[in-house]
């Protein structure tokens, strides 16, 4: 899908030749009225110092995320001004946070269909040339203006370009932050595209090919294992899940090498169930409506690697994309079938709808065989995650507290919401099988945690491992908000990029 173009400029906002101007407004403490964020003196002057009065008259309050549109009536080159709320004005010495700015420009861009060219002063909202603010604004603009129009015959023209006003666009720190923000935003948008694609247009081979096309395009090495190679390699989980579909499974292995002196070796694993019918444990029809998103983990890992190829952190990274379609048929796996996972461990399949952990087990075992320092897996794994944490917060489980906490911290910096969850050892017994090494489901209570314990079984001692269950946050079934649309969200691409680049410093 087409991406929003973006550029930096030091030209004044009031003279920008665009269709709409976006400025920030806040609320003065204790009900003191509307305040104009820094960086807008030229705009206020163009309105003869009556901009705040005009905005107040049409109901603007400065509440975070509030969008107020105002005709400029010739006061500026652009015909429309959009004031977006930033919330209460920070106390002296404090700042509006990067996530506040990201959501503000995202909310504006989301509501500006029909205005293809916009310009904004939000990167100056804290009164300085902050590199972090520049990165936040370009991310928010690109993601808020994101549209998935592949299947629409007609659509209102979305935002096509954003001009970001800064004090000095040639400043090295500002330019680097802009480039990083742009790379991250494009990676998130790619993830959204993949998740939003209809399952009939994204079979396992297509998802693997997406890794070739997008990761190969930024200089990464990509190897795709077809069903013959998977059988030879002992990927019994991937083959078992995929055997019910007429579209055979694939595993893509994506490699980024930092060269000599790399500070760590990381393997990422993404669940890529391109459609999950539940197999012979068929889901109810309503539960299947958004199961095209069951490859959200694979899409996030794949997309993260496209950003890594551009940002080039000092970390060696290998990504495994486990691609299969879980369908009911005469060849589908049955309850009580036993699969042999790569490495030799056997799994009794008690529930064919608990299939994601089977493909993940194969790739975790394959990753572990290469003895990395870290394995981080990402999966839309359990409905129990939605029950526990809802649609906005994903779970982080790990066999190492420091790793778990660093991923949660990275989410906070990136503007995503990860929450630490335990792996209670007393739940492990419920995964015992009468006929195999382990069963694929355990106690229903604590199902998210039990799924994490299942995956932990395939991580040998000495390797730090974390599991991100993104079942709810990967796909927004509710209303759009901030820079987040309905459908694919791109979670947790920004967390992964933040964590990986920080690891290489």
Image: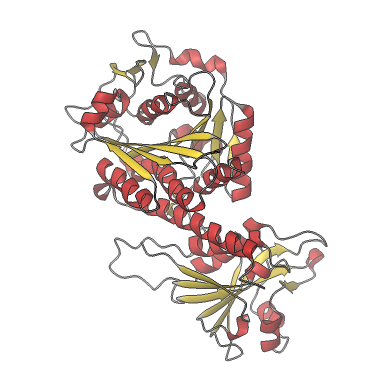
Judged from this view, the residue extending furthest toward the front is 260
* Left or right, residue 158 beside residue 135: left
Quarter residue 203 falls in? top left
Q: Residue at x 81, y 61 (%)?
A: 91
Q: Residue at x 44, y 34 (%)?
A: 383
Image spot of residue 277 (x, y percent) = 29, 36
| Residue 338 in sight here | yes
Image spot of residue 25 (x, y percent) = 68, 71
* Left or right, residue 237 beside residue 4: left
Which image quarter is the N terminus in?
bottom left
Residue 283 vertical placement versus 153 (above, below): above
Residue 77 vertical placement versus 216 (above, below): below
* Colour setup of the view: secondary structure
Query: How many numbered tags mark residues here?
Result: 0
Quarter residue 237 falls in? top left
Judged from this view, the residue extending furthest toward the top is 434
* Left or right, residue 327 beside residue 348: left
From the viewer's side, name the closer residue of 227 and 95: 227
| Residue 65 in sight here | no
Which image quarter is the C terminus in?
top right
From the viewer's side, name the closer residue of 403 and 373: 373
Q: Residue at x 40, y 53 (%)?
A: 218
From the viewer's side, name the closer residue of 159 and 190: 190
* Left or right, residue 380 beside residue 78: left
């Amino acid at each position: 899908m087409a991406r929003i173009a973006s550029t930096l400029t030091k030209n004044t906002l009031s003279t920008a030749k665009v269709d709409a101007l976006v400025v920030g407004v806040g609320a003065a403490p204790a009900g003191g009225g509307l305040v104009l964020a820094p960086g807008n003196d030229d705009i206020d002057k163009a309105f003869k110092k009556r901009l705040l009065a005009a905005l107040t008259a049409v109901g603007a309050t400065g509440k975070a995320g509030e969008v107020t549109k105002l005709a400029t009536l010739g006061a500026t080159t652009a015909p429309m001004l959009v004031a977006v709320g930033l919330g209460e004005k920070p106390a002296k010495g404090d700042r509006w946070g990067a996530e506040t700015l990201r959501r503000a420009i995202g909310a504006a861009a989301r509501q500006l269909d029909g205005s293809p060219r916009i310009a904004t002063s939000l990167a100056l909202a804290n009164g300085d040339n902050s590199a972090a603010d520049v990165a936040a604004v370009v991310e928010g603009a690109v993601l808020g203006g994101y549209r998935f129009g592949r299947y629409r015959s007609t659509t209102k023209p979305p935002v096509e370009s954003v001009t970001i006003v800064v004090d000095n666009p040639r400043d090295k720190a500002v330019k680097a932050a802009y480039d990083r923000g742009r790379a991250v935003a494009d990676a998130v948008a790619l993830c959204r595209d993949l998740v939003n694609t209809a399952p009939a247009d994204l079979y396992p081979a297509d998802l693997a090919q997406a890794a070739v096309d997008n990761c190969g395009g930024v200089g990464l090495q990509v190897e795709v294992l077809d069903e013959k190679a998977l059988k030879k390699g002992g990927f019994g989980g991937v083959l078992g899940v995929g055997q019910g579909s007429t579209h055979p499974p694939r595993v893509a292995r994506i490699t980024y090498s930092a060269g000599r002196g790399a500070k760590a070796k990381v393997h990422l694993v993404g669940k890529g169930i391109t459609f999950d019918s539940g197999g012979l444990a068929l889901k109810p029809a309503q539960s299947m409506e958004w199961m095209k998103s069951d490859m959200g983990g694979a899409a996030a890992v794949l997309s993260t690697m496209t950003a890594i190829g551009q940002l080039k952190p000092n970390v060696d990274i290998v990504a495994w994309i486990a691609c299969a379609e879980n369908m009911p048929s005469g060849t589908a796996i049955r309850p009580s079938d036993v699969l042999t996972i790569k490495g030799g461990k056997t799994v009794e399949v008690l529930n064919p709808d608990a299939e994601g952990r089977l493909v993940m087990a194969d790739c975790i075992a394959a990753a572990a065989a290469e003895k990395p320092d870290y394995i981080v897996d990402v999966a839309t794994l359990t409905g129990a995650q939605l029950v526990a944490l809802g649609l906005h917060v994903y779970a982080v489980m790990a066999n190492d507290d420091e790793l778990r906490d660093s991923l949660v911290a990275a989410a906070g910096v990136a503007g995503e919401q990860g929450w630490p969850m335990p792996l209670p050892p007393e739940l492990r017994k419920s995964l015992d099988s009468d006929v195999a090494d382990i069963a694929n489901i355990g106690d229903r209570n604590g199902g998210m945690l039990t799924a994490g314990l299942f995956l932990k079984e395939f991580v040998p001692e000495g390797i730090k491992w974390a599991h991100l269950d993104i079942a709810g946050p990967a796909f927004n079934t509710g209303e759009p908000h901030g820079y987040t649309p309905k459908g694919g969200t791109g979670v947790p691409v920004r967390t992964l990029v933040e964590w990986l680049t920080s690891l290489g410093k």
